[in-house]
Image (spheres, grey):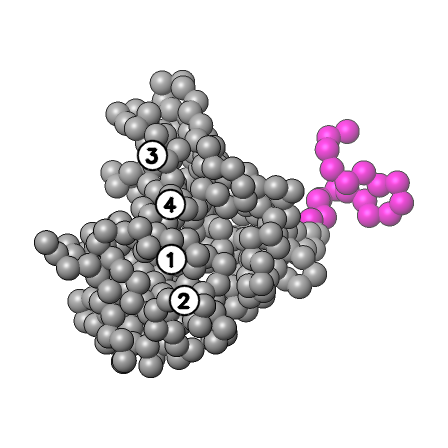
Amino acid sequence: MTAPLRVAVIGLGVISRFYLAALRDSPSMRLAAVCDSDPAKPAACPVPGYTDHVRLLDEERPDAVVVTVPNDVHLRVCADALERDVAVCVEKPLALDVAQGDALRRLADRRNVPLFTAFHRRYNAAVARLREQCAGSRITEVTVRYLERIEEHAGDDGWYLDPGRCGGGCVADNGPNAFDLLRLLLGPADTAPEVVAARIERDARGTDRRADVRLRSRTAAARILLDWSYSGERKDVEVRLADGRTLHADMLDGHPGFKGSLWHEYVGVLRDFDRRVRAPRTPDGGLAALRFVRAAYHLAETRIAECRAPAAAAPPQAGTGTGSGARTGGDG
């Protein structure tokens, strides 16, 4: 029988409890150590606890780490693990931006160490049923809705609302999960969906709270709707097929309570990560999701700039007057 992987969890924020529960029940992994900058959090766990992730890596020598620190620390923590040949499962997004994500991917490839981005919604039971219903049919349209009240989700993790630490707002945080679902449903035979338009609403702090992003792939149109100011929680996918059928997946169906669906999704995350560690690696979409985020922000800013730009004055037409009462176009 293959020995269980010794896994350390670095970062004990709001998402860590789902990983810890999945590790507790995993037949192929066991929790080896934990780390958080707040010493009270590691002290509450029944395994060795640290406040310095480098010390954890050097003293515990885990087979793999789960990284759930704020987005702006992903690069440093993941790189420190990869440089010690420790497999990495990192919460989406892979890094703060494309440049950081590309640096991590190159480091993982150079050292031949698994680097896995956790897109937990792809392991949702309703999404799995939707994929089965779509099998063999051509998808023409996909809409993903990802609506929540971010203050309810974040709890004490205030960094979510700091654009510098998060990488933005709802587009940077929820966008990668929504984009990954598009790629999952459209399949490898299609090209990655390309952002063609984006409208983003920000609060006074500059954090994007709502977004409407339009995409287009080789065969389908797609739309991602994000909202951090939604009263409650709505996470669903709607698919239109070429045969005229419209299919729907409610990712929260059967999971009462806020964030209730995450318990079974993170079981799927760790199961897939275990396979990636023990078998040959394949790209996991972390960089593609970061490119989506960059493109959405760029197009939204371009749209704002175009709206603010003054309209160019039309050149005077021959034979038209310029004084009061003069006609400025059209035939008499």
Question: Would you name the residue on which mark 4 appears?
Answer: 265
Instruction: Compare residues 44 and 204 and report the one nearer the observer.
Output: 44
Question: Would you name the residue on which mark 2 appears?
Answer: 45
Question: Is disc 4 placed on a helix, strand or loop?
Answer: helix
Say if mark 4 contacts mark 2, CB within 8 Å: no
**Residue at 27% across, 75% down:** 60
Question: Would you name the residue on which mark 3 appears?
Answer: 128
Question: Is disc 2 placed on a helix, strand or loop?
Answer: loop
Q: N-terminal of the two: label 1 or label 4?
A: 1
The tag on residue 20 is 1
- Indicate the amino acid at tag 2: Cys
**Residue 267: image x %, image y %?**
33, 48
Marks 2 and 3, Cα distance to the nearest angstrom? 33 Å
Q: N-terminal of the two: label 4 or label 2?
A: 2
- Indicate the amino acid at tag 4: Glu
Question: Is disc 1 placed on a helix, strand or loop?
Answer: helix
Marks 4 and 3, Cα distance to the nearest angstrom? 11 Å
